[in-house]
Amino acid sequence: MKDPSIRTLIIERAAHMLRMREPITLRSLVSQTGVSTMAVYTYFGGMDGVWKALRQEGFTRLAERFALVRASADPVHDLTALTAAYIGTAMDHPDLYRIMFDETLELEDHQAVDATLGHLVQAARRGRDTGRFRAGIDPRRLATQSWVVGHGLVSLVTGGCLSPRSLDDGAAMLTALFIGAGDRPDGCRASVEAGWRHLSAPMETDRPPEVTQGDPR
């Protein structure tokens, strides 16, 4: 039977080598991994399969992290939590994160990639439909803006331009974004603060504060 850990080992090795700009061959890929070149064929069907799996793996892990963010009664919390989960995934897997947006590498499943943004769009739509955001807000646009906040911050941090402490600024950025989209300041700050805790893997006991439509947020 195949061992999933070997597949993961080869993918992470390839991502690291690409980031370090090391030449990648069949032999150099398995060097220092403790597995033979045959493992590349067993798990990927060859080097072409490695390239396809490499970029996809980043989105696969992001989808797994998003799945831990369970929808709540507070869509602003959820949209924040998803953005924080995105940042957390990138910080946990910086090599794979850099490859996720390398269009020179083919993707195995484009729909799975689109689905990651879909999580944020759904939360933004619920925010509009429940009155947290203005009725005229475009959910996809707001979701994209939330993603840009997370992507911009984490790209600068993983690239060494900013210290990891700069990630804390993300909560204030999202708060400003959501207030601009129509949410009321007090309730928005509470929702974002609770959602931002998902920068670390969310726990089952983590629940947002109860906010109902018409609440003086």
Image (cartoon, rainbow, N blue to C red):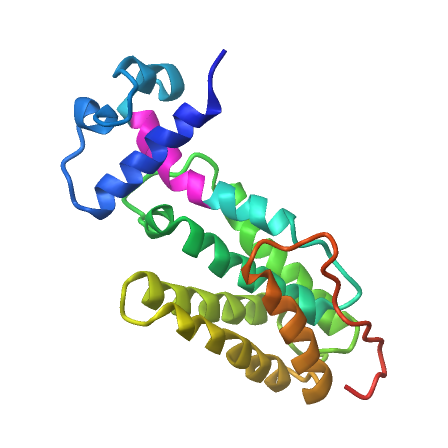
Magenta-span inclusion, residue 50: yes
Give the residue at x 74% y 78%: 132
Res. 80 visible in picture: no
Give the percent coordinates (x, y) of residue 184.
Answer: 71, 87
- Left/right placement of residue 124 relative to residue 156 reads right
Horizontal arrangement in the rendering, residue 36 relative to residue 7 (left or right): left
Residue drawn at 39 percent across, 68 percent down: 164
Residue 177 highlighted magenta (yes or no): no
The quadrant of the image that shows the C terminus is bottom right
In the image, residue 170 sits, relative to residue 140, either above or below, namely: below
x and y percentages locating residue 10 in the rendered image: 33, 29
Q: Residue at (72%, 73%) from the top-left corner?
A: 128
Q: Is residue 196 left or right of residue 182?
A: left
Determine the residue located farthest toward the left in the rendered image.
23
136 over 121 or under it: above or below? below
Vertical relation: 39 (above or below) 139:
above
Instruction: Specify the segment rendered in magenta.
Output: 48-58
Q: Quadrant of residue 104?
A: top left
Residue 38's image quarter? top left
| Along the viewing direction, whichever of 216 and 116 lies nearer the viewer | 216
Q: Residue shown at 78%/78% (left/top)?
A: 131
* Chief SS of the magenta region: helix
Q: Is residue 126 above or below residue 56?
A: below
